[in-house]
């Protein structure tokens, strides 16, 4: 699955994708709110619109609630809409739980170390409470080539970094060239979908993380100098143990490196060498 497109200009009409409150896949008996409204927000007056005939949940005392055994009151909120980037949700979008197996067969750009770039957002159980910004977490993620990733009780969006598939492997399913006005041009899922052979062996997953840096140029007195409009800075992080490198570029001083995370077992330490130059 690669090279699908999604514009993110609207939200899914499927109400389960829009307002999903599934029973937890981690601990039974807990309902956890998720769904597309975390990514698109709830615009002013949208709840009134839902209350007047487009209601996917229930009306209690004039308020819109959603959920089965536990009710959640929805609020007009931005949630994470201001930080969500639709280019991270071109191929895949799921509002329940996801297991992404290791991908190391598709053709990627020179030096590309990530199989997927994506965005993940979730909220812990808030039984009987309003679904607000409280407790909401979100993050950009990167899944390295050759590593698996699991997401529970959360909305997960992914874009494949692959540019081609010419490795002469016979595939029973190919999803490419599809378009969506919402998210997940390749797959939008509110149930269960499985391709190929599901690995039933216990796997170690990682939690990718982001390193954010700001570059400033100063003179010998410490005064900040202007950066020319044509100046582009190139930076490189090198893992001193594996010699893997991660590149970043900036024209305004701000840059991010999405790095593979750590095994669920063993030490949580990484030594990185930081180098940079100006073009």
Image (tube, helix red, strand yellow):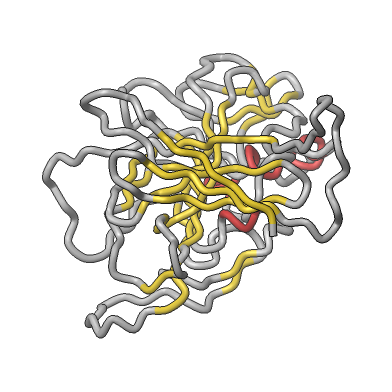
Left or right: 39 with respect to 186? right
The residue sitting at 34% across, 41% down in the picture is 150
**Vertical comparison of 269 with 252: above or below:** above
Which quadrant would residue 166 be assigned to in this image?
bottom left
Q: Is residue 164 above or below residue 276?
A: below
- Residues 200 and 263: in front is 263
Which residue is rendered at x = 70% and y = 38% of the image?
A: 215
In front: 24, or 195?
195
Q: Is residue 205 left or right of residue 250?
A: left
Give the residue drawn at x 33%, y 56%: 145
Vertical placement of 11 versus 275: above or below? below
* Residue 250 drawn at (x, y percent): 69, 50
Could you tell me which quadrant the C terminus lies in?
Answer: bottom right
Query: Foreground residue, 8 or 168?
Result: 168
Q: Residue placed farthest to the front in the image?
A: 220
- Can residue 95 be seen at all in this image of the molecule? no
Please tell me which residue lies in front, 235 or 136: 235
Q: Percent from the top left, x then y, of residue 169?
A: 23, 80
Question: Residue 122 placed where, x, y %?
Answer: 52, 31
Q: Quadrant of residue 269?
A: top left
Quick check: 172 above or below 25? below
232 relative to 28 in the view: left or right: right
Residue at the location (26% across, 78% down)?
171
| Quarter of the image where the N terminus is located | bottom left
Using the rendered image of the protein, determine whether residue 261 is visible from the camera's viewpoint: yes
Quadrant housing residue 146: bottom left
Specify the farthest residue to the left: 201
Q: Residue furthest top?
A: 128
Q: Position of residue 246 (x, y in %)?
A: 47, 50
């Amino acid at each position: 699955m690669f090279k699908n497109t999604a514009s993110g200009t609207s939200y899914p009409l499927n109400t389960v994708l829009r307002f999903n409150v599934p029973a937890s896949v981690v601990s039974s008996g807990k309902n956890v709110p998720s769904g597309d409204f975390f990514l698109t927000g709830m615009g002013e007056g949208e709840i009134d619109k839902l209350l007047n005939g487009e209601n996917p949940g229930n009306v209690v005392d004039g308020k819109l609630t959603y959920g089965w055994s536990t009710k959640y009151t929805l609020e007009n909120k931005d949630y994470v809409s201001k930080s969500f980037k639709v280019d991270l949700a071109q191929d895949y979008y799921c509002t329940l739980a996801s297991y992404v197996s290791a991908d190391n067969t598709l053709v990627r750009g020179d030096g590309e170390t990530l199989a997927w770039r994506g965005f993940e957002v979730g909220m812990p159980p808030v039984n009987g409470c309003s679904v607000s910004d409280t407790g909401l977490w979100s993050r950009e993620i990167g899944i390295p080539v050759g590593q698996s990733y699991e997401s529970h009780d959360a909305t997960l969006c992914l874009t494949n970094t692959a540019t081609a598939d010419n490795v002469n492997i016979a595939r029973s399913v190919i999803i490419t060239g599809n378009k969506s006005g919402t998210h997940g041009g390749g797959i939008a899922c509110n149930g269960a979908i499985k391709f190929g052979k599901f690995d039933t062996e216990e796997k170690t997953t990682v939690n990718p993380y982001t390193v954010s840096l700001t570059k400033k140029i100063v003179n010998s007195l410490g005064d900040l100098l202007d950066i020319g409009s044509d100046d582009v800075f190139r930076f490189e992080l090198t893992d001193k143990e594996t010699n893997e490198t991660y590149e970043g570029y900036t024209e305004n001083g701000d840059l991010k490196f999405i790095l593979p995370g750590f095994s669920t077992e063993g030490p949580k330490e990484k030594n990185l060498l930081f180098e940079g130059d100006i073009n």
